[in-house]
Image (spheres, grey):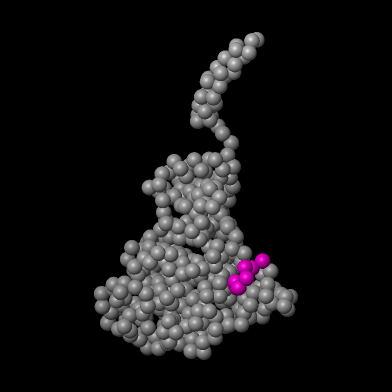
Amino acid sequence: MADDGYKEGWPQDQAALPDTSTNWTLSKALRSYADTVAPAFTPENSSLNLVLDKPAMADIDWTGEHDPANTGAAIYTGLQPYASDPRGPAQDGSDGSGAQLDAHAKPGWIQLSQPGTLEAGEDGSGYYTYGTTPGGRPGSAYQWGTLRTMQVIGAVADRLATGDQYTPFGVGNISLSDGAATGDHKGHRSGLEIDIRPARTDGAQLPVTYKDPQYDRAATQRLVDAFRGTGQVGAVYFNDPRIGGATPLAGHDDHLHIQLKR
Amino acid sequence: MSSSKWIAAMGAVVLIGFPLGLYAQHVGSVAFSGEYHFFSGTVGEKGPPTKKDVKVGLSLSGALALRMYQSMGSAAHIESCGDGDDDLRLRGDLLCSRNKLTGKAECDVGIDLHSGKSVLSIDPC
């Protein structure tokens, strides 16, 4: 993937989010911060590149080794796909960790942990899923990918949370377990592509386009920056021209396509 | 019929019939292959068809798709954001691709059945 010129990583003049209240939401905190101290936004000096008191993304081992300093990177440690699991599938089709197993899965691929299996505030609950099965029926069939992909999602969820406060972001289709082609996407076969919903001002777990009044540009920028901050992203496709670090592409008014580096 | 007359007759068939065959291919109906699916929403938020929102996605293949791909011209090329095995061409809501390895083409377009207008039916990514 060609370099698209976006400057990755967190800015040097990092600042902490203001103290959170019990009804904290990402959008409220961002607006509060932007109203008071944020300088004019540029992709290189994003006022929304708020960094919390957490380790740098660059310190994460993206190969899946457990990093005790970063919970996001550790979410999937120890999970193995069914193909290499001598125990075979559990009776309920899971390995007990929240991830589903699939005999047809590509070696090394795992399914994104579905937040419904986790308690609020647990690792991984910084996102929600809106994946589908081929054709658009709700389901999780499209939420398979590489271990690194799951690490990135977990790390972004971790990065966007403050303590146990967060507004979950929506994770849509990634790949089918065997990477098969479908009539829904031209891509999404490598396990390295993630569809993400833009943020909403009301925090509702619903679709939104960048033209809707419920669209939260500031929070969406922070989402893009969080993914970019992992250093694992090759390109982001999204049509809001005021979002830095994203390239416009037909069909991307209502979701961001995150392409990880190979 | 002498052999010379037979050759002349066959030549006439070829000279007249072949162009006529081509003409018929252009103005007549020619069968094509493809698939379809019904859906609602957008390519980023697809759902099952509903009473208020029903669209049909048409996926054309074979010679028709290849000709459409070629007719769109190289100016319609867009960067592939997927696995890179397809050359993509996009004009409006019509997305055509040709696989770099197999040479096979596919074209996708949707129709909103309540408005009659075209929509994207497949995510370019």
Q: Residue at x 39, y 85 (%)?
A: A52
Residue range (magenta): A104-111
Q: Residue A98: image x %, image y %?
A: 62, 78
Name the residue nearer the viewer: A214 or A44. Answer: A44
Q: Residue at x 43, y 43 (%)?
A: B72
Locate residue A221 relative to residue A92 in the image: left or right.
Answer: left
Q: Is residue B117 above or below residue A214?
A: above
User: Residue A219: in sight, yes or no?
Assistant: no
Quadrant assignment for the N terminus of chain A: bottom left
Q: Residue at x 42, y 76 (%)?
A: A231
Q: Residue B17: image x %, image y %?
A: 55, 22
Name the residue nearer the viewer: A170 or A206. Answer: A170
Residue at the limit of the structure toward the top, as seen here: B1
User: Residue A50: in sight, yes or no?
Assistant: yes
Locate residue A53 relative to residue B37 in the image: left or right.
Answer: left
Q: Residue B45: image x %, image y %?
A: 50, 61
Name the residue nearer the viewer: A175 or A20. Answer: A175
The mark total stands at 0
Q: Is residue A196 above or below residue B103?
A: below
Residue at the limit of the structure toward the left, as seen here: A40
Residue B57 lies within the magenta run: no
